[in-house]
Image (cartoon, rainbow, N blue to C red):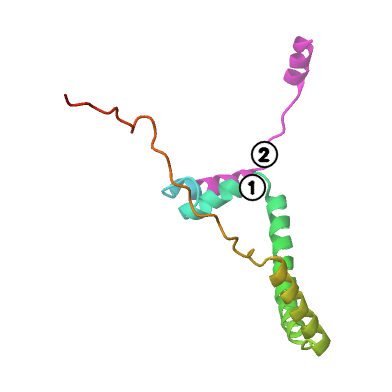
């Protein structure tokens, strides 16, 4: 099977590159060859960033666009939040009284218990190791 394919390829005739194209291609190649490096010099940080982002450039561009939209919305909405925070009315008298009652109830519930009078400590008996036998002096 490969031999048939190879035979067909050998029988194909290749077209010549137009002379005008060949001259342009060779002139551009000569420009690049005369430069010190084969590729244009880039800053190392840009090269690292490009290598990191290159596998999925459309995904990274989309992610950057989403972040820009989020940032713009956040900046546009920040003034509205400040105004709404200042609009809260002061608490009413009834609310203040209810809060005071609640604090008093909590103080009663969580108050430390009254101290209980403890019995006086009983005299302790010495342990067996502290008791020494009496010696008789005769």
Q: Is residue 94 visible?
A: yes
The Cα atoms of the two marked residues, 2 and 1, are separated by: 8 Å
Percent x, y of residue 55: 65, 44
Q: Which quarter of the figure is the C terminus placed in?
A: top left
Count all numbered tags in the image, as a single digit: 2
**In the image, residue 62 above or below residue 9:** below
In the rendered image, residue 23 lying in the magenta stretch gets the answer yes
Q: Main secondary structure of the magenta part?
A: helix
**Disc number for residue 20:** 1
Residue 49 placement, left or right of 20: left
**Along the line of sight, which residue is nearer the eye, 26 or 80?**
80
Q: Secondary structure at mark 2?
A: loop
Residue 80 lies, in percent from the top left, at 76, 81
| Residue at 72% in and 33% down | 15
Identify the residue at image location x=70%, y=75%: 75
Quadrant containing the N terminus is top right
Q: Which residue is mark 2?
A: 17
Position of 91 relative to 112 (above/below): below
Which residues, given as a range, are shown in magenta? 1-30
Locate residue 61, reporting x and y percent: 70, 56
Say whether residue 41 is visible.
no
Tell which of 44 and 63 is nearer to you. 63
Q: Residue at x 52, y 49 (%)?
A: 48
Q: Is residue 19 left or right of residue 98?
A: left
Furthest residue toward front: 138
Relative to 86, say whether 136 is above or below: above
Taking the image as shown, residue 98 lies to the left or right of residue 28, namely: right
Secondary element at tag 1: helix
Given residues 41 and 28, the one toward you in this image is: 41
């Amino acid at each position: 099977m490969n031999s048939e394919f190879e035979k067909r390829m050998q029988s194909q005739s290749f077209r010549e590159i137009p002379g005008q194209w060949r001259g342009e291609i060779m002139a551009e190649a000569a420009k690049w060859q005369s430069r010190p490096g084969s590729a244009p010099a880039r800053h190392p940080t840009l090269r690292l960033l490009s290598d990191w982002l290159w596998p999925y450039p459309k995904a990274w561009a989309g992610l950057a666009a989403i972040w820009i939209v989020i940032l713009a919305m956040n900046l546009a909405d920040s003034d509205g939040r400040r105004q709404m925070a200042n609009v809260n009315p002061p608490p009413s008298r009834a609310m203040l009284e209810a809060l005071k009652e609640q604090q008093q109830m909590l103080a009663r519930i969580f108050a430390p218990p009254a101290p209980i009078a403890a019995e006086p400590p009983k005299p302790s008996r010495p342990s067996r190791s502290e008791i020494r036998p009496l010696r008789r002096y005769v």
